[in-house]
Image (cartoon, coloured by chain):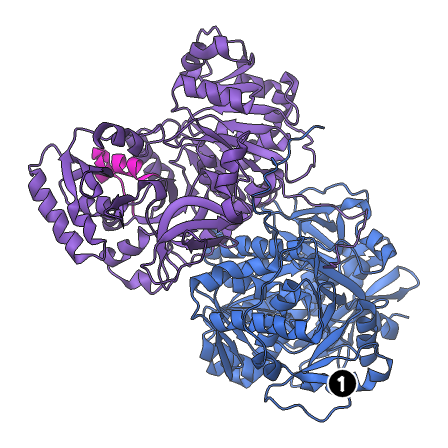
Chain colours: A blue, B purple
């Protein structure tokens, strides 16, 4: 095929999609807009811009150059936001270390990512000291909330604020190829070693535009607009806090960074700073709802996108009853991450809370530029009937091209030219996708697929249930059958048998596989979690399946 | 500088920013959403998608292949929207012919663009017959509103609807390089021959995302969101109707195409179809305000972006008094086109209509990813003080890289690595840009710059003035002095002297160059316009300057 390319004009500027270009609009807009850290520190966007330039000068002075990898260990902070920009803008790679991993795993990711320098909050110095002898790295910068550096055996180059103050506030950021790697981090799956994921400047800029064009263009519900006040409650080490700090910066809105998560502090910040848009996993929301302080603050109009795990219907209804606009966002580490959002159409907003919740807890509709298909095992698209279930596979301009130094898993991820999410779902005639299970969490009962997620949702709706996880256990007759591990509110009394009868009533009414009736229930003290707070089904299966 | 590129995974999908990908989201969203033509014809998005596929099959059957140029001559229609997608999606180039040009100029652009086939509305067959003998083209498709093809000596392949009906409704659109040319059209400047501008798939997709992220994310005023009903009142041959049909399609909103512009029909469509978002030049708005029908329709809540010429303050105030949300969008043929939008901050919306109008008529603030500078002749950025005046130069990912087969003008356009807009402007501390004149329309009085635009705005505010254009005329003492050519409402009585005194009162109060007081006024019957309705100052200077 013969195609005509752009005519070549050597005088024209060859615009690359670089992270530095995200900064063009907001700083132009209102240089007095604020970035706040725990209400303790306040910066204007103009100061933020200067600090990004100072950070670039500081890192360059220490010897960081394009192609190097700079790791950060911090809570959600203004400093982290500065690193989100300055490090990739230098042509270096930002490694956002998962601070909740065990020291051995942290060591593995630092080695595997080939980090050259680490910026670490004072809280994480002990972890680094523990693995110091085996670290091929000898440059640390300390991030300190009070300006003090505790005694440490690490080779510290200095404290962040002091070094910034010594650096010039203008830096001439270079132009380079938009396909240059900008960030890397490690997925914390429940199987195998952590896998390194990476994203380029182009991918991050396009994800920012894509998220903005979908979240921004909602008429009202689920919108993220120029008048909002933003606070992430998703760790910034985790898929760039869903990419939303980049979106917030491009929007030029007030941003609030809460540091280490403490429920009362989070609620106080929402109240005091007037936060209107956040995002978090259900576990965090659960903590907030259980904080006594929740009844002292007005959360009306607070928009919260829930992701990372499925949003329980009971939680969504409680949120709506408090005037919170809660809805699902869907994605994964490999997808930058956002792929779809459960925004409601104007007609759906006329429904009552219960009916709205059924839609808000869905996986939602794909964002612009995202080609999302539900396919069977032969990769054929399934009908939009709300029943036919297959795997979600995707194409979009912000998907990880593979795992760092892991050709085998990269091939598996992209089998057949589509990225495999590993999530089983159906899609209704209005285009709303609903995840029914992880491919690997599907329970096969007598040859039929039973969704552990749907069973969890049913049991969760009982008022006495605090938490639930459903796994498949060995069964001679059926091969597998579903077992629900349930944590009951200690102040309430109910038997396993009573809860089972309750659940079966719901199963009968639903459109689930009949084999779901083979459910068993077992009460437990607590449910094992992964480092980022997801239910660890691998561990649960090890304990209870055999 | 050593930079790490994306790791190479041959299994991963190499996503290109292609126009076909704009179609992913909306069709998924709501296949029952409507596309309407003059209230006569209604299509769902699902049908639209099928028609795009049919059109691709139809063109392929006729022999169109990747790299060919397909020209269209039509009013704003559903057919044109189908061509916006199907032609570039084939890898071919869409040439949007300016139907208002003289036949000789149309011939020039068809030749220069190297068109291979022309799709023409029945109204334009006589024009084509006139130039037929000199056209190196022998394939025409007729676009007919009533299905009939009038007698013609042209070599017609058939009628659009009939050919569509004969074509299959699935086409496998290929993937290709995003830097492939997608569209071309000709700028109708007031000097020299028409210049060919062209845009690639990547540029059009990024312009769509950029416009969406800025227009979409407005909290309320000036927003374009998923709940809107869209109707263009800018010709679709002119810079892709400002790129907004692509934006509307990506948003998945109801779209209304008005065909040939007739004021009463436009007002009726707004009313009947519930149109909430449009865009046009001031001339069209003037026609609508002068239509008797305007008082029969409710225009409250109608959002109108004005561009192509500066928005007169009096027009803006009249719009606000009718409940219309009117504001400026800025750009030019070479910029795809949108660069900036005069959206108001929440605090500005608390101002009265008069004060709001002062902001709404400004050039506005740059969209995301647009680097817009006001520079002096040495290309140094000027301070944001609302006074210092220089040329607007820009960088963004959707700027024309040059003119087709015109290296000299391409170099001038990109002198110094920035695209030169030729517009003189200042910028205030809040980042709002205000154009004071075209570089070439600046009047040099005794060595001082006098803005013709500011003088026009002042005279326009007098209630008896229908239209005004200010040019520089020869003057022995001053070199040049300003002359206002004014069309007065025929039902009103005022002398040139009275109007001059009125204008001078305003000039005294303003912060304009003192030399503006040397203004002269001359009443005229009408003011010369270019083919797209802009004031033709070149022609006016020829008539009045010497």
The answer to whether B516 is drawn above or below residue A192 in the figure is above
Seen from the viewer's position, the closer of residues B152 and A544 is B152
Q: Most extreme residue toward the bottom, as rendered?
A: A151
Q: Is residue B357 left or right of residue B94?
A: left
Q: Is residue A433 visible?
A: yes
Looking at the picture, how far across and down is residue B324, in whole percent? Answer: 30, 48
Whole-percent x, y for residue B315 in the image: 24, 45
Image quadrant occupied by the N terminus of chain B: bottom right
Given the current orientation, which residue lies at the most extreme front position? B477
Whether the magenta-drawn stretch holds residue B92 is answered as no
What residue is rendered at 52% in x and 37% in y?
Answer: B410
Q: Residues within 10 Å of mark 1 (few under 14, many from 20)?
A: few
Q: Label 1, on which residue?
A: A155
Residue range corresponding to the magenta coloring:
B281-300
Nearest the viewer among A530 and A349 is: A530
Q: Is residue A386 left or right of residue A513?
A: left
Left or right of A133 on screen, residue A254: left
Question: Residue shown at 62%/59% (left/top)?
Answer: A174
């Amino acid at each position: 095929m013969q195609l005509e390319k752009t005519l070549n004009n050597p005088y024209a500027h060859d615009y690359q999609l670089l992270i530095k270009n995200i900064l063009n609009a907001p700083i132009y807009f209102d240089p007095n807009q604020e970035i706040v850290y725990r209400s303790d520190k306040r910066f204007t966007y103009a100061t933020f811009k200067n600090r990004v330039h100072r950070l670039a000068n500081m890192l360059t002075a220490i010897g960081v150059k394009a192609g190097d990898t700079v790791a950060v260990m911090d809570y959600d902070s203004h400093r982290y936001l500065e690193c989100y920009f300055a490090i990739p803008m230098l042509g270096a790679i930002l490694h956002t270390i998962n601070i909740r991993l065990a020291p051995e795993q942290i060591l593995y990711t630092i080695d595997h990512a080939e980090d050259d320098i680490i910026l670490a909050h004072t809280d994480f110095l002990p972890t680094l000291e523990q693995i110091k002898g085996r670290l091929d790295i000898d440059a640390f910068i300390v991030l300190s909330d009070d300006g003090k550096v505790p005694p440490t055996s690490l080779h510290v180059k200095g404290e962040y604020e002091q070094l910034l103050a010594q650096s010039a506030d203008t830096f001439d950021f270079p132009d380079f190829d938009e396909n240059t790697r900008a960030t890397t981090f490690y997925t914390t799956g429940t199987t195998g070693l952590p896998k390194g994921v990476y994203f380029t400047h182009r991918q991050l800029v396009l994800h920012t535009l894509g998220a903005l064009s979908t979240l921004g263009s909602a008429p009202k519900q689920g919108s993220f607009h120029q008048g909002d006040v933003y606070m992430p409650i998703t760790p910034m080490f985790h898929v760039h806090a869903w990419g939303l700090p980049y979106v917030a910066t491009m929007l030029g809105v007030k941003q609030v960074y809460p540091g280490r998560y403490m429920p009362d502090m989070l609620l106080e910040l929402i109240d005091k700073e007037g936060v209107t848009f956040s995002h978090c996993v259900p576990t965090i929301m659960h903590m907030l709802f259980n904080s006594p302080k929740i009844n002292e603050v007005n959360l009306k109009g607070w928009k919260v996108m829930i992701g990372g795990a499925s949003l329980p219907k009971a939680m969504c209804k409680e949120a709506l009853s408090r005037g919170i606009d809660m809805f699902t966002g869907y994605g994964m580490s490999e997808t930058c991450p956002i792929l779809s959002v459960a925004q409601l159409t104007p007609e759906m907003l006329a429904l009552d809370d219960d009916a709205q919740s059924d839609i808000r807890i869905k996986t939602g509709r794909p964002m612009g530029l995202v080609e999302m298909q539900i396919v069977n095992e032969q990769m054929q698209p399934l009908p939009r009937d709300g029943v036919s279930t297959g795997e979600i596979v995707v194409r979009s301009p912000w998907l990880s091209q593979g795992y760092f130094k892991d050709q085998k898993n990269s091939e598996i991820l992209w089998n057949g030219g589509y990225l495999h999410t590993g999530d089983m779902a159906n899609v209704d005639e209005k285009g709303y996708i609903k995840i029914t299970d992880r491919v690997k969490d599907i329970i096969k009962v007598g040859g039929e697929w039973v969704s552990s997620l749907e069973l969890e949702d049913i049991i969760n709706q009982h008022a006495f249930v605090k938490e639930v996880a459903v796994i498949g256990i060995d069964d001679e007759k059926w091969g597998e059958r579903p077992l629900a591990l349930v944590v009951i509110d200690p102040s309430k009394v109910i038997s396993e048998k009573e809860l089972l009868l309750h659940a079966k009533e719901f199963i009968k009414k639903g459109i689930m596989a009949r084999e779901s009736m083979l459910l068993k229930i077992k009460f437990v003290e607590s449910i094992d979690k992964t480092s980022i707070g997801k239910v660890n089904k691998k561990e649960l299966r090890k304990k209870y399946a055999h």
